[in-house]
């Protein structure tokens, strides 16, 4: 799945919102306007915006629910209702999200029991490999291997050939259109482990938690810090959204990171709430897709395997708040831990 902004072949016609009429020169209104800084919609691609995209998202949600971004070369939607609607509305096209109906129709024979078994086995093998180290990077040593390993195990690829084949023939055999989701699952898992391990209360709550509570934590992590921040779509015709009307045939950037923190949809949206009673996430659809099922199972068994193999596991000094990076996709690049505490 590609998340790069769509670039139209040939020329490009910029679509801009209609500007308000200007006050006559010399009038009190014109003088007052001259004293005020001009307010321009910020872009997620502006230099420095990636360090804290949620500030940009907040301004867009509140003040520019519909705007055209010249850097993305697309119209931008940031409110939950608009983004969630666009992900499944047939009036938007040229997009794929694992778990959406077109994807789910091709995966009606998913054997969740088999996927659970391979996810569990792979997670425990990887956890034991790093349990005796004084320090380990869970991104490089665990998250990078678990999604690939579960796919390889599910289709019978030998462990030694896993990384060579899993992104090609093996992944295609298991996940069809969702092969690109291996990289997304890596990022999602890294973000999930960072969310859990950076808070002592979450560690204790999830150490021996039932699958249902782990699933709630997984959903909350995807909502608050989605691994895919921006998805691209295109309109089939004119579509009314918050703030105006999208033109026909226009590229549209859906800001999942902004929608996941929309206070109109979620209470106290910036807070990670393990027991949230208004849960939701937009990274995955609800259908029976292997990429969706595996991602959730990998999150569950990652915690079980890590806590069992390393009962005193904790983040290394200096990594109490692992930094996420990226604009289109976003996740921690490193997650340094002390397996022995």
Image (spheres, grey):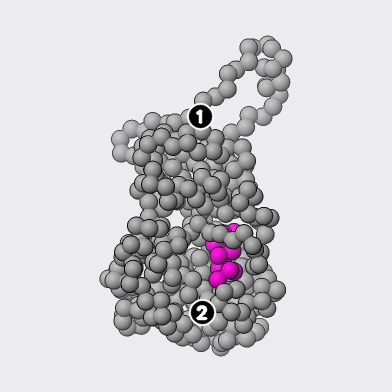
Q: Which residue is mark 2?
A: 301
List x then y, in percent, for residue 216.
Answer: 58, 68
Q: Give the residue at x 46% y 82%.
A: 120
Depth order, front residue of 10/277: 277
Q: Give the residue at x 41% y 63%.
A: 287
Q: Which element is circle 2 on? A: helix
- Is 218 magenta? The answer is yes
**Is there any visible trace of residue 47 in the rendered image?**
no
Query: In the rendered view, would you say 101 is above or below 196?
Result: above
Q: Quadrant of the C terminus?
A: bottom right
Q: Residues within 10 Å of mark 2 (few under 14, many from 20)?
A: many
Would you say the magenta stretch is mainly helix, strand or loop? helix
- Is 93 magenta? The answer is no
Q: Give the residue at x 50% y 50%.
A: 84
List x then y, in percent, for residue 228.
Answer: 48, 57
Q: Residues within 10 Å of mark 1 (few under 14, many from 20)?
A: few
User: Spatial distance from mark 1 to mark 2, Cα to Cα?
Assistant: 48 Å
């Amino acid at each position: 799945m590609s998340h790069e902004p769509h670039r139209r072949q040939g020329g490009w016609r910029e679509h801009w919102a209609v500007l308000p009429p200007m006050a006559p020169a010399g009038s009190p209104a014109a003088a007052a306007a001259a004293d005020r800084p001009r307010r321009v919609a910020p872009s997620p691609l502006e230099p420095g915006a990636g360090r804290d995209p949620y500030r940009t998202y907040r301004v867009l949600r509140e003040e520019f629910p519909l705007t055209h971004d010249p850097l993305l070369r697309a119209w931008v939607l940031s409110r939950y209702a608009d983004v969630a609607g666009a992900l499944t509305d047939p009036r938007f096209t040229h997009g794929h999200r694992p778990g959406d109906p077109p994807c789910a129709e091709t995966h009606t024979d998913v054997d969740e029991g088999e996927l659970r078994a391979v996810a569990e086995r792979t997670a425990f093998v990887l956890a034991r490999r790093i349990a005796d180290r004084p320090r380990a990077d869970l991104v490089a040593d665990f998250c990078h291997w678990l999604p690939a390993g579960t796919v390889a195990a599910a289709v019978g690829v030998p462990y030694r050939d896993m990384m060579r084949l899993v992104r090609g023939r093996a992944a295609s055999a298991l996940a069809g259109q969702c092969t690109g989701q291996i990289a997304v699952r890596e990022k999602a898992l890294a973000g999930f482990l960072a969310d859990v391990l950076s808070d002592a209360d979450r560690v204790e709550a999830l150490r021996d938690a039932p699958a249902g509570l782990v699933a709630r934590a997984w959903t909350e992590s995807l909502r608050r810090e989605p691994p895919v921040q921006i998805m691209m779509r295109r309109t089939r015709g004119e579509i009314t959204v918050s703030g105006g009307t999208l033109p026909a045939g226009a590229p549209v950037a859906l800001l999942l990171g902004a929608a996941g923190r929309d206070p109109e949809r979620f209470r106290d949206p910036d807070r990670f709430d393990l027991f949230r009673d208004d849960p939701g996430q937009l990274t995955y659809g609800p259908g029976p897709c292997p990429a969706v099922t595996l991602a959730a199972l990998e999150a569950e068994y990652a915690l079980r395997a890590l806590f069992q193999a390393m009962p005193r596991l904790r983040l290394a000094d200096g990594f109490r708040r692992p930094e996420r990076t990226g604009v289109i996709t976003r996740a921690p690049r490193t997650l340094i831990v002390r397996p022995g505490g």
